Image (cartoon, rainbow, N blue to C red):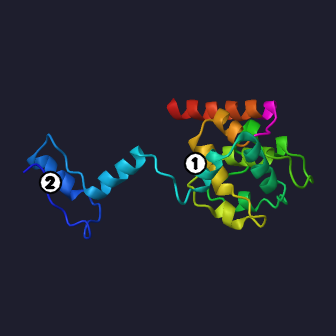
Amino acid sequence: MDRIEIDQSKCIQCGDCVNACMAENPVKHALTTVVRDRFEAVAQKQEIVDPTPVQTLLAMGQAERKAFWHDHFRRCIKCYGCVDICPVQMPGTHGSLEIEKWVPRGEVPPVHPLFHLIRAFQIWDTCVLCGDCEQTCPAGIPLKTLQDVVRFFSPEEVFDLVPGLPEDAQGAIIDYVNSLRADQAG
């Protein structure tokens, strides 16, 4: 027998069957029907019934994304709740990417997407995706979605997904990200 039978109603996807199968038969690995069905669903490119916010954003065109972010960012009252609640945000440690250098004081709503992208890129490599920033925001801005975009896409892709950032700010963000990457590699 080259397959083991598993009661799918009791399977918790622990992987023990895979280990057992590999020990007995290193050529053919165990694959439960649940996992097989998931692979087949992806292969068939079935429509996503309940898309995540990032999937929804990726499905939008450039103009639609720009309108989406504009509608959210224009509600910002620049309360700094997202900065204050963040467990990894450390003001004063971002050199050329300090918010105070880019965003004029007293301007509400702040220049968008400048304020929000700088805040997001300041913690792009340390964010734990807890979502406290989004839960704290009195304007209901999808800050965790923005953080997901910043974390999982290159800066150039982010500028396409969150359009409207001035070129000098784009350059500063790219330089900041590259310097952090160099520090991490070295």
Residue drawn where x is 66% and y is 59% of the image: 86
Q: Nearer the viewer, residue 127 or 87?
A: 127
The answer to which image quadrant residue 17 occupies is bottom left
Q: Position of residue 178 (x, y in %)?
A: 62, 30
Residue drawn where x is 58% and y is 50% of the image: 55
In the rendered view, tell whether residue 58 sits above or below residue 33.
Answer: above
Q: Is residue 160 magenta?
A: no
* Whole-number angstrom distance, CA of label 2 to CA of label 1: 38 Å
Residue 174 is left or right of residue 27, and the answer is right
Residue at disc 1, secondary structure? loop
Residue 92 visible to an observer of this rendering? no
Q: Amino acid at mark 1?
A: Thr
Classed neighbour count for the residue bearing mark 2: other residues with Cα under 10 Å, few (<14), some (14–19), many (≥20) = some
Tell which circle, 2 or 1, labels the residue nearer the N-terminal end: 2
Residue drawn where x is 41% and y is 47% of the image: 42
Q: Which residue is mark 2?
A: 20
Residue 76 is left or right of residue 15, and the answer is right
Tag shown at residue 37:
none
Q: Residue furthest left?
A: 1
Q: Residue furthest bottom?
A: 10
Q: Amino acid at mark 2?
A: Ala
Q: Which residue range is magenta in the image?
A: 163-169
Q: Residue furthest right?
A: 106
Residue 130 visible to an observer of this rendering? yes
Residue at disc 2, secondary structure? helix
Tag shown at residue 126:
1
